[in-house]
């Protein structure tokens, strides 16, 4: 029995390092996002391109039920553009005779979901419900860097690693095996501003858009923070000046 245990431990010493290497996840790429830092702002051109990527690609599987079309004003879309975007979507409704129907979307409507319910979403995606993207960036450790890494991290599995049918190898996904097929391809969308739609550009743009919908108040919050810091600095200076004045004639 003792010899068997020794042999088993010796075998595991040879196998486990290889398994560990197969499970290792590389560090996330650290991108220079426009919204980083205390003075960061949204790159509105990138966010608008990201909305196009979401609309033409991601919205086929992922809902965004906490976002309304009118929210697109935050990344620079005009009222007329928002109205046209919303109107291009059919929204379910109950007609006056009690039967189900549809109507053109309104700016006040939430983004249309690709599936009527979770069961339909599971049936279309091998039993897995694609996550809602309304707050996806904030819900994932690593935030925008993680989302970008997943979108660009699909690669061929290393030698000796078997990828079961229905799964895909992604070097940044924990465990590396992911249900979602590679969602982005070069030139999958056509940018109206002439930007080259490389895989990396599409991933960067849609991540910027997803960060916006998760944090639409970010710029206002940062402006308020800067104003508070300035106010506190002025108040501190004034307090010190008053203290010097009051105590100037006091003998030590």
Image: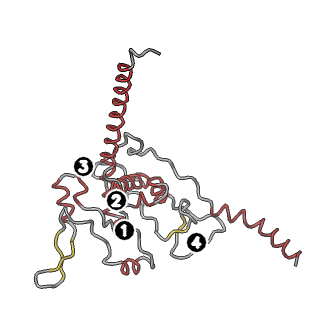
Q: Marks 4 and 1: which is nearer the front?
A: 1
Q: Which mark is residue 62?
A: 1
Give percent across and percent down for residue 67.
Answer: 29, 62
Q: Is residue 203 left or right of residue 72?
A: right
The Cα–Cα distance between marks 4 and 1, rounded to whole angstroms, is 24 Å
The Cα–Cα distance between marks 1 and 3, rounded to whole angstroms, is 23 Å
Work out whether residue 249 or residue 95 is closer to the camera in this orientation and state it: 249
In the rendered view, would you say 118 is above or below 13? below
The Cα–Cα distance between marks 4 and 3, rounded to whole angstroms, is 43 Å
Is the Cβ of the residue at disc 4 closer than 8 Å to that at disc 3?
no
Q: Earlier in the sequence, mark 1 or mark 2?
A: 2
Q: Earlier in the sequence, mark 3 or mark 2?
A: 2
Q: Marks 1 and 2: which is nearer the front?
A: 1
- Residue, disc 3: 76
Tell which residue pokes out farthest to the left in this image. 96
Work out whether residue 223 or residue 198 is closer to the camera in this orientation and state it: 223
The Cα–Cα distance between marks 1 and 2, rounded to whole angstroms, is 12 Å
The Cα–Cα distance between marks 3 and 2, rounded to whole angstroms, is 16 Å
Tell which residue pokes out farthest to the front in this image. 251
Q: Earlier in the sequence, mark 4 or mark 3?
A: 3
- Residue, disc 2: 53
Is the Cβ of the residue at disc 4 closer than 8 Å to that at disc 2?
no
- Residue, disc 4: 163
């Amino acid at each position: 029995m003792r010899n068997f245990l020794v042999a088993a431990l010796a075998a595991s010493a040879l196998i486990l390092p290889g398994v560990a290497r197969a499970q290792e996840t590389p560090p996330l790429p650290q991108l220079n996002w426009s919204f980083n830092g205390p003075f960061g702002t949204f790159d509105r051109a990138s966010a608008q391109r990201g909305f196009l990527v979401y609309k033409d690609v991601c919205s086929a599987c992922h809902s965004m039920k906490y976002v309304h079309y009118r929210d697109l004003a935050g990344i620079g879309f005009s009222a007329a553009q928002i109205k046209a975007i919303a109107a291009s979507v059919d929204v379910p409704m109950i007609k006056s005779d009690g039967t189900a129907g549809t109507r053109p979307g309104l700016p006040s409507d939430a983004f249309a979901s690709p599936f009527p319910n979770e069961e339909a979403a599971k049936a279309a995606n091998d039993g897995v419900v694609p996550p809602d993207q309304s707050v996806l960036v904030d819900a994932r450790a690593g935030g925008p860097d993680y989302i970008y890494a997943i979108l660009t991290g699909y690669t061929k599995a290393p030698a000796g690693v078997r990828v079961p049918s229905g799964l895909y190898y992604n070097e940044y996904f924990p465990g590396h095996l992911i249900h979602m097929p590679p969602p982005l391809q070069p030139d999958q969308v056509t940018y109206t501003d002439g930007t080259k739609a490389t895989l990396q550009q599409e991933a960067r743009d849609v991540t910027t858009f997803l960060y916006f919908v998760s944090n639409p108040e970010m710029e206002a919050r940062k402006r308020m923070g800067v104003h508070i810091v300035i106010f506190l600095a002025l108040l501190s200076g004034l307090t010190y000046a008053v203290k010097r004045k009051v105590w100037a004639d006091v003998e030590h």
